[in-house]
Amino acid sequence: MRGPGLHQVQYPAQRMSQTMQRALNLLQMDNAELSGLLIEEAARNPHVQVTLPMPEDPPPRKRRHWGTPGLMAGAADFDPDRMGAQAAGLYAHVQAQVGFLFKTANERAITEVFISALDLSGWLGETVEEVARAAGCSPERAEQVLRRLQGVEPTGLFARSLAECLSLQLAEAQALDAPMQRLLENLPALARGDTALLLDRCGVDAKELGRMVALLRSFDPKPGAQFDSDPAPRRAPDLIVSRDSLDRWQVVMNRASTPEVQVARLAEPSSKEGLETARWLERTLSRRSQMILRVAGYVIAFQHAFLEQGPTQLKPLTNAEVGAALSLHETTVGRIRTGLLMQLPERVLALDAFFGRGRVACRNGGSLAGDAIVAIIRSLIATEPSKAPLTDAQLVDALALRGITVSRRTLANWRKRAGIETASDRKCAK
């Protein structure tokens, strides 16, 4: 959510409320939105120096030989199920689409070489010329095949650079206009926060440049990485959750997506107000990171069982409870949890997903969130006999054996909200 520009400063009587509002706006922004706002401010204020991390283009590497040579050589040999079983994740996903896009043996031979040159990020690790030599075709023919390969989902696969990866996604979103194209041509300047050059090259004002950067940073720079785990949101996560050397859970800011701001030391300060704004930004963003890490760290520790054992162990948690534990107002916690993404070892989750809704008491004295109960119901239904699906009454009994007491009416309501059919409907479907 974007707030008013940081450059808007009025009379002293209004200054405190405006400063507080700006701080709150910064608190609830994700890293993509924050990048756009900071670039906009840096374009207006020479005292603000912004650095945006950018993924590097893939280095040259040896080709990956992951499957059976010649598997796609002939149309008669095409078997999507067989190919899906032979390769995992990204490669299975790509091959399932390629098999329907290319029909001739020659085309499939070329696509096989392209796929073998695909990195787990989704980018190509070899040039078109190298692929053409390996495939025994002309570079022009390889380029034609590549253009069609770049039409597979998710958009951005088979890109040869960060700029091309983002341009494919922008084109799909119908947002690749001339200024945006010029921004893509100047990504190094964007990374180092050279807003004067960007304003000149893109031919836009500070506000429009900020909007463009926020949009650009909302796309996925490595669309292939999501196939290492569960499907992930398009943009890079804001936080990274991992285990430390003592096997404890820890959370840190994602430096690969978090913008950095510093006060530029100018020989001749442009204005006292600009210098004060830059210093305020530096302090406020530091406090923002600290506050986010406090909230995320508490949530991670509280939901330890959820991290270890999965959604059936999600405990109820509210903004007020986190606020009371950390001496923060519950609305502050609400702003922090809005829109932030966390990279876990095996998937990406919104911070909001750790705030379990609903509260069901268990006989052991603990409690579970309503979402955990739904997850348990799903697990019970997943293993039910196909000819005798579990009724609501049987599900209530199964929960009772786990120390969870709910009425049949309550269970039916949860089942309906989760989109789970009745036992009779499930039996007909099977």
Image: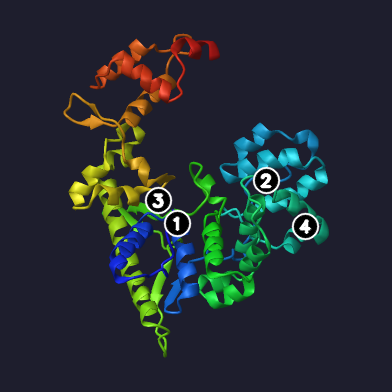
Q: Looking at the picture, how far across and down is residue 300, in whole percent?
A: 29, 47
Q: Quadrant of residue 355?
A: top left
In primary-sequence order, the first of circles 3 and 1 is 1
Mark 1 or mark 2, earlier in chain: 1
Mark nearest the camera among 4 and 3 is 3
Q: Earlier in the sequence, mark 4 or mark 2?
A: 4
Provide the residue designation for mark 2. 152
- Secondary structure at badge 2 equals loop
Picture layout, residue 164 above or below residue 362: below
Give residue 249's position: percent from left, percent from top: 29, 50
The reply to whether callout 3 and callout 1 are in contact (CB within 8 Å) is no
Could you say where residue 236 lies in the image, as x and y percent from the top left?
48, 54
Asked if residue 430 can be seen in this view, the reply is no
Instruction: Identify the mark nearer the N-term, 4 or 3.
Output: 4
Query: Mark 4 falls on what kind of element?
Result: helix
Closest to the observer, 373 or 145: 373
The amino acid pointed to by label 1 is Arg
Q: Secondary structure at mark 3?
A: loop
Quadrant of residue 264 within the rendered picture = bottom left
Which percent across, then down, holds residue 117?
66, 55
Of tags 3 and 1, which is closer to the observer?
Answer: 1
- Between marks 4 and 2, how big is the CA–CA gap? 15 Å
Reply above or below: 139 against 395: below
Name the residue that disc number 1 marks.
2
Q: Earlier in the sequence, mark 2 or mark 3?
A: 2
